[in-house]
Image (cartoon, rainbow, N blue to C red):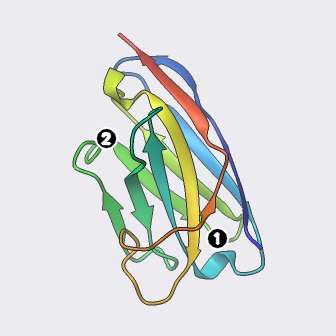
Amino acid sequence: QVQLVESGGGLVQAGGSLRLSCAASGRTFRMYSMGWFRQAPGKVREVVAAISWNDDSTYYSDSVKGRFTISRNNAKNTLDLQMNNLKTEDTTVYYCAAEKYIGQACNKVTYDHWGRGTQVNVSS
């Protein structure tokens, strides 16, 4: 029922910024926990940031804390990830994810709705 489409990826120099966006469709979007994940080829997908359905809590991985900011606009059905002070190790594919809220913390949700991903490349 939920469809997710990421955008905003591209090439940027280290220290620069990018803003990723995720457009979501579906009648239950406003009650969905959402998150941004990244996965390099051949590696395990890892959570980067997550946000609760009601925007009351957020989670950030240690590697991006203080540099990235996750936000959502439920009225517009969008999820954003502001990425500042980008590092070369941030280079990978980033995915948007969503799941119905059932009482779990946003970073503990088993997400099963995924976008196709958007490529982020950070050059030195």
In the displayed structure image, the side of residue 90 where residue 101 appears, left or right: right
Q: Counting other residues with Cα less than 10 Å from the Cα at mark 1, is it few (<14), some (14-19), or many (20 or more)?
A: some
Report the amino acid beneath label 1.
Asn
Judge by depth and name the residue closer to the eye, 98 or 41: 41
Name the residue at 26% across, 45% down: 66
Total labels: the figure holds 2
- Say which quarter of the image contains residue 72: bottom right
Q: Residue 92: horizontal and vertical position, in percent?
A: 46, 31
Question: Which quadrant of the figure contains the C terminus?
Answer: top left
Whether residue 37 is situated above or below residue 25 in the rendered picture: above
In the displayed structure image, the side of residue 14 where residue 81 appears, left or right: right
- Residue found at the very far top of the displayed protein: 124
Q: Which residue is mark 2?
A: 67
Query: How far apart in space, not on screen, are marks 2 and 1 (Cα)?
Result: 23 Å
Whether residue 20 is situated above or below residue 5 in the rendered picture: above
Q: Residue 54: horizontal and vertical position, in percent?
A: 50, 79
Q: Which mark is residue 121?
A: none
Report the amino acid beneath label 2.
Arg
Name the residue at 25% across, 42% down: 63
In the displayed structure image, the side of residue 95 where residue 59 appears, left or right: left
Q: Which type of secondary structure does the marked residue at label 1 adopt?
A: loop
Judge by depth and name the residue closer to the eye, 82 or 33: 33
First of labels 2, 1 by sequence position: 2
Q: Which type of secondary structure does the marked residue at label 2 adopt?
A: loop
Whether residue 49 is situated above or below residue 2 in the rendered picture: above
Question: Which quadrant of the figure contains the N terminus?
Answer: bottom right
Whether residue 90 is situated above or below residue 69 in the rendered picture: above
Name the residue at 72% across, 64% down: 76
Name the residue at 46% across, 50% down: 37
Q: Which residue is mark 1?
A: 74
